[in-house]
Amino acid sequence: MNSFEPALIERFAAIVGDRNAITDPAEIAPHLVETRGLYHGASPLLLRPASTEEVSAIMRLATETGTPIVPQSGNTGHVGGQTPREGKSDVLLTLSRMNRVREIDTSANVLVTDAGCILDTIHEVATKHDRLFPLSLGSQGSCQIGGNLSTNAGGTQVLAYGNMRQLCLGLEVVLPTGEIWDGLRKLKKDNTGYDLRDLFIGAEGTLGVITGAVLKLFPCPRGHQVAFAGLESAEDALAFFEMAAATCGPSLTGFELMVRLGVEFTVRHIPGVRDPLAEPYPWYVLIDISTFDSAESAERMMQGLLENAFSAGVIRDATIAASTAQARAFWHLRESMSNAQRPEGGSIKHDVSVPVSSIPAFMAAAEKAVLAHMPAARICAFGHLGDGNIHYNISQPVGADKADFIGRWREVNEIVHGLVLSFNGSISAEHGIGQLKRDELAAIRPPIEIDLMRRIKHAFDPAGIMNPDKVIVS
């Protein structure tokens, strides 16, 4: 049955109520375009269930009728995994009404939540209980935890706390058949068979719909220091990281690398952002230290680290945030860097990772290769040096035609990704595969890996209705 048929729309509406079965094209429109405008889809229907049981009923009906379902969280993804296909009858499913924190257990340091809960809300609830949920993203005011789990989101504190796979203890998932798997376990040690949780985390909604999660919490740090340093080279940044890791150990919670152009774009286009240093430098590092004993220990640690780095000639200038507001301002500069590229025209993005020790060599090789292919391109590279994740973004030449530049996306990707693979890296560090990298994934992974992924997909979704044509083509 075609999902455009009124009779089928009525059957779905009977599950969630007419008000939550949206057919108005104007209301659906914001859900059809991915954040960078690379993918535009179509959908006759947007469903907003209020419970896991309603999601289950939706999936049973979808399997019965062969209706493709595209789960969508905050629509903040960058690879088109949340976007319905063009020319198809994909039905959008959003858990925005399922936004309740179900439980917080401070003894076990866990929080149980609906998958539609906004990340900022989870931060607020944890803070009220003197706890920290460390996932931090630029989109945390709108992204939902189900989407964070489905893409195995990373963010700025992976160095100390890990990505979503490490921050989740258990899941509740509705399978394509409508069956409900209740895996909301609070256990940190559980060796009973296959780890089903890890199959759904990072699967981008292709195996089932995550409806709930058990998240790890941590004590709130008592000491916190943030500094911004200027350096001459990426090699110096790596040397600085090695010093920081040796000095701070687990207290090193952030180590972000930025090229000068990114700072210039952000100061130019993001209101209220200022250059933290008096003189320009080719490279910058934002360093974040958190301690659990006292504010004084964090202050001593940061001052000692910077003094040693100055003495070694590794950094040229640095400033320590004098207040919480200034620390937030430093982070705001870093987190706004991607958005600051938009007023400069088209931007070809790369979310890649290479071994930390290879970052300087990769940066040099990528710059040489890209500029040989496109001499006037402007390279805006930044990212999480501590875990090897670089957002190697390339802004269009000044005065270039944006459409023509974006039209060269694939050829530029081929250059950069080819270098990434030569350094034994990954073409997707934290944004996922979605539609953008699906065909490339199939081309670069060993056939046995792709075959195993297809077998898993077929085992969970024999009808092929769950977020079809994303990650892999089954």
Image: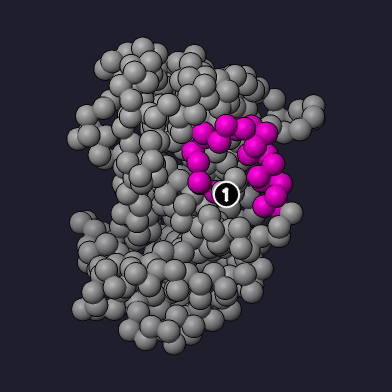
Left or right: residue 280 versus residue 185 is: left
Q: Is residue 43 or residue 286 the one in the foreground?
A: 43
- Magenta residue check for 408: no
Pick out the residue farthest to the front: 1
Q: Which residue is mark 1?
A: 472
Disc 1 on helix, strand or loop?
loop
Q: Position of residue 388 (x, y in %)?
A: 58, 62
Residue 216 rendering spot, x and y as whole percentages: 58, 32
Choose top left, top right, bottom left or bottom right for residue 346: bottom left
Is the C terminus in the top left, top right, bottom left or bottom right quadrant? top right
Identity of the residue drawn at 43% across and 26% down: 1
- State yes or no: residue 467 in magenta: yes
Point out residue 439 in the picture as x, y percentages from the top left corner. Answer: 54, 58
Span of residues in magenta: 449-472
Image quadrant where residue 106 sits:
top right
Q: How many marks?
A: 1
* Residue at 22% in and 34% down: 25
16 up-or-down from 140: above or below: above
